[in-house]
Amino acid sequence: MNDQTILVTGGTDGIGKETAIQLARMGACVLVHGRDQKKGTQVIKEINRDTGNEKIALYLADFSSLADIKRMAEDIKREQKTLHVLVNNAGNFYKERRLSAEGFEMTFAVNYLAPFLLTMLLLDLIKASAPARIVNVSSSSHRSIKNIDPDNLQSDHDYDGYTAYSLSKLENVLFTQSLIDKLKGTGVTVNALHPGVVNTNLLRKSYAMEGVGVEEGAKTSTYLASSPDVAQVSGKYFDNMRERPASDLSQNRELQDAIWDLSIEMVSEFLN
Ligand SMILES: NC(=O)c1ccc[n+]([C@@H]2O[C@H](COP(=O)([O-])OP(=O)(O)OC[C@H]3O[C@@H](n4cnc5c(N)ncnc54)[C@H](OP(=O)(O)O)[C@@H]3O)[C@@H](O)[C@H]2O)c1
């Protein structure tokens, strides 16, 4: 992985931090995205020390601000010549309904719209670095959503944290599916995954379940970001390093197109 440059969003904690460590151990140049300078700097030091890899850099952006994401993407494009892998991992859980800097419901903004915009802004760099990969960290909870009302994507009237979270994770899979056609012939693959139920801050503040350790939880992200076995595989959903069918709803072409069009409209002022 010595010639690979990899961006891991939400690389300062949980599954993302462990994914960054595993990829750094393989020798990749790892760009760790975080939102807090002090925590990020500490994590970079830790990865340097534990892996012996010095090619680790920190990029900061609060994913609840599209303007901040655009600024970070510009920093990356200015400073990096290549980007071979983008791991869209950052995510959060909000029990109460809150609004992002641009007025979007927070779960939708951080878990879905942020990686959507970041991917769009970095796509030319990723294509120019092909063969390249986009890895979207979703969740098996996407299966609990049985229908979507495109007019109520932001749970305007009936907010429930679990539903909003599951909806955002379904949107991650819909986005993955939409990208397949757009990436045909570019040498860039895109896949989604469920990392398992993993002991992290997010799990503690949401489902209050017991999960596996982060080493186990990061392995499917690391596999999709690095393994030659999946270099040619695109548009699939993985669980425990195995391809699995995503939900029927995520395969709905009309829905994929509708959500894509709406998302483009929502981020349009940040695309140029
Ligand atoms: N844990 C599970 O069981 C599980 C199951 C299925 C899917 N997932 C998915 O796995 C991914 C990683 O989650 P995790 O469980 O590892 O959670 P985590 O330990 O809470 O880590 C989340 C990461 O995202 C970052 N983040 C959160 N809100 C952000 C914001 N507004 N702006 C920028 N960065 C932000 C966090 O930054 P800070 O370090 O600053 O907090 C952290 O680096 C998520 O996409 C989640 O949906 C997790």
Image (cartoon, rainbow, N blue to C red):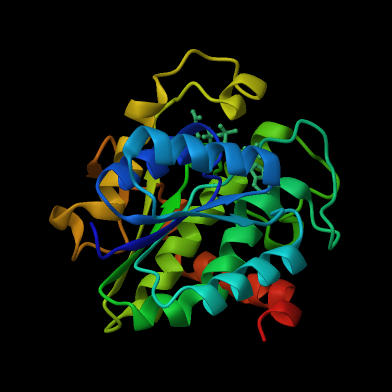
Does residue 188 appear to the left or right of 154 in the view shown? Answer: left
Which image quadrant for residue 133?
A: bottom left
Q: Report the residue at 52% width, 49% height from top.
A: 170
Q: How many marks overall?
A: 0
Give the quadrant of residue 96. top right
User: Foreground: 115 or 148?
Assistant: 115
In this view, the residue in front, 251 or 23, is 23
Residue lying furthest top: 210
182 vs 92: above or below:
below
Quadrant containing ligand 1 reads top right
Query: Which quadrant is the N terminus positioned in?
Result: bottom left
The quarter in which the C terminus is drawn is bottom right
Q: Quadrant of residue 98?
A: top right
In the rendered image, is residue 138 in sight? yes
In percent of width and height, residue 90 lies at 56, 46
Q: Nearer the viewer, residue 87 or 82?
A: 82
Residue 232 lies left or right of residue 98; in this view the side is left
Which residue is painted at 57% across and 24% down in the image?
Answer: 203
Residue pictured at 76% horizontal, 81% vertical: 269
**Does 244 appear above or below 204?**
below
Q: Position of residue 37 (x, y in %)?
A: 69, 46
- In the displayed structure, 47 sits above or below 245; it is above
The residue at the far left in this view is 229
> Residue 228: percent from the left, percent from the top?
14, 57
Q: Position of residue 215 (x, y in %)?
A: 35, 28
Does the image show residue 194?
Answer: no
Query: In the drawing, does residue 104 fall left or right of residue 181?
Result: right
